[in-house]
Image (cartoon, rainbow, N blue to C red):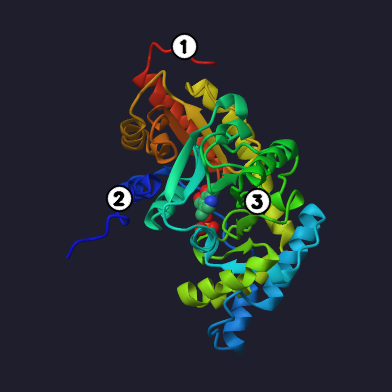
């Protein structure tokens, strides 16, 4: 039996790095994880308590496809708290992480062969999911001068049916200002390009707050998740806000593709919404980690980095050391015992000269990781002038 052409997507390299790191750990090595974008903290206490009592009380069977009404209301309240926006809970679709939301959004908005733009470097799965759905991914090489985000002039002549952006972005951590986001949405509007905003890193921000596309227009799809700010990656729970007249279309797709998001995770997510003290305390750790990384990475030799506005990543230009970030990351893992992600995951063209460092773990782990990186770099590039 032959597999389909559209199933031939690229591997998610960071998952391969995680596997190599897990193998090293299984052989007894101690590895510092700077590869994966996930907090080491568990789901908030209130999330776990809510699930513990729900497990005693009920069967946790299927829910309605759009999600538990109380969770949809809770998410709508979050829009009021975070952005001062009144969003009808009717427009909120609860999904199995933002990953399931991409499937729903791309299916609801596009037909086979439609052209969907995405900034490079960017989150790799957009591209692969688009390909698996027989859609055309149109990579837009972004510039450091534009903070690695697309700008309206990038869209000219591209004939795009859709555009997906993330702010804060992965891997760069950069955010679109209100004006930059509004300009992009306007440019898309003028060209009949549907706009999807991945807001999964909202809440994890260091310089001002992230702007939601919903503050600018209601005619957009906004995707978010409990994975990052709420520290619930493995629970597979997220959401999407869609225009009112799309709800029924998305509901029919969700019914057939997923039946519903996991009921247990929905209960836990509802609990997580009232754990602000705990989630804000996690943010303090990321703040401390970010400061440490920005101070110490240049001393270790990673001098070409721009301070990220949000998320928990630093994207470093390592072209002075390599053109093969895959081999470089592999050597760093073997030699220094630090797992980092090659830029190739995010930008097939230029990513050979970039690495992404994630600082989502504990500050003690980050300090140890930097110590190891510095020792490795001093040994590997003894003659190199670094910023110390
Ligand atoms: C920008 C971005 N979007 C979406 C995801 C997927 O997240 P989820 O766990 O909600 O599926 C990630 C995961 O790292 C991400 O970085």
Point out residue 377 in the picture as x, y percentages from the top left corner.
40, 23
Query: Pointer 1 and pointer 2: residues touching (CB < 8 Å)?
Result: no
Cα–Cα span, label 3 and label 2: 28 Å
Q: Is residue 281 left or right of residue 120?
A: right
Give the total of numbered labels.
3
User: Residue 213 shows which numbered tag?
Assistant: none
Kindly identify which residue carries mark 1.
385
Kindly identify which residue carries mark 3.
282
Q: In terms of sequence position, does the residue under pointer 3 or pointer 2 come before the other?
A: 2
Secondary structure beneath dot 2 equals helix
Secondary structure beneath dot 1 equals loop
Q: In terms of sequence position, does the residue under pointer 1 or pointer 3 come before the other?
A: 3
Cα–Cα span, label 1 and label 3: 35 Å
User: Residue 23 shows which numbered tag?
Assistant: 2
Q: Is residue 201 left or right of residue 29?
A: right
Identify which residue, 214 or 309, lies in the foreground: 214
**Residue at mark 2: C-beta within 8 A of ligand 1:** no
Q: Is residue 35 visible?
A: no
Q: Is residue 313 left or right of residue 187?
A: left
Identify which residue, 98 or 282, lies in the foreground: 98
Q: Is residue 254 above or below residue 215?
A: below
Residue drawn at 52 percent across, 67 percent down: 96
Residue 80 lies in quadrant: bottom right
């Amino acid at each position: 039996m032959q597999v389909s052409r559209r199933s031939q997507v690229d591997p998610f390299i960071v998952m391969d790095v995680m596997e190599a790191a897990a193998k090293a750990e299984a052989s007894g090595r101690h590895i510092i994880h700077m590869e994966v974008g996930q907090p080491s903290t568990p789901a908030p206490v209130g999330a776990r308590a809510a699930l513990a009592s729900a497990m005693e009380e009920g069967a946790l069977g299927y829910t309605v496809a759009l999600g538990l009404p109380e969770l949809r209301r809770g998410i709508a309240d979050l829009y009021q708290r975070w952005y001062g926006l009144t969003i009808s809970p009717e427009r909120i679709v609860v999904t199995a992480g933002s990953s399931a939301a991409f499937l729903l959004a791309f299916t609801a908005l596009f037909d086979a062969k439609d052209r969907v733009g995405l900034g490079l470097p960017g989150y790799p799965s957009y591209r692969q999911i688009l390909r698996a759905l027989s859609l055309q991914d149109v990579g837009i090489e972004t510039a450091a001068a534009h903070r690695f985000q697309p700008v309206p002039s990038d869209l000219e002549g591209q004939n795009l049916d859709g555009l997906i952006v993330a702010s804060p972005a992965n891997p760069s951590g950069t955010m679109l200002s209100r004006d930059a986001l509004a300009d992009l949405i306007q440019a898309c509007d003028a060209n009949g390009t549907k706009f999807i905003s991945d807001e999964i890193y909202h809440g994890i921000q260091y310089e001002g707050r992230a702007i939601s596309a919903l503050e600018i227009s209601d005619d957009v799809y906004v995707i978010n998740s409990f994975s990052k700010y709420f520290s619930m990656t493995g629970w597979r729970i997220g959401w999407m806000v869609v225009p009112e007249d799309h709800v029924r279309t998305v509901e029919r797709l969700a019914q057939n593709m997923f039946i519903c998001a996991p009921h247990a995770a929905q209960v836990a997510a509802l609990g997580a919404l009232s754990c602000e003290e705990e989630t804000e305390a996690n943010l303090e750790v990321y703040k401390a980690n970010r400061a440490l990384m920005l101070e110490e990475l240049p001393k270790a030799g990673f001098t070409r980095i721009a301070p990220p506005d949000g998320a928990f990543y630093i994207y470093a230009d390592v072209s002075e050391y390599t053109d093969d970030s895959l081999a470089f990351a592999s050597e760093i893992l073997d030699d220094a015992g630090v797992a980092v992600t090659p830029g190739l995951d995010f930008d097939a063209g230029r990513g050979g000269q970039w690495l992404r460092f994630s600082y989502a773990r504990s500050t003690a782990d980050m300090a140890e990781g930097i110590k190891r990186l510095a020792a490795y770099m001093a040994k590997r590039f003894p003659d190199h002038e670094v910023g110390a």
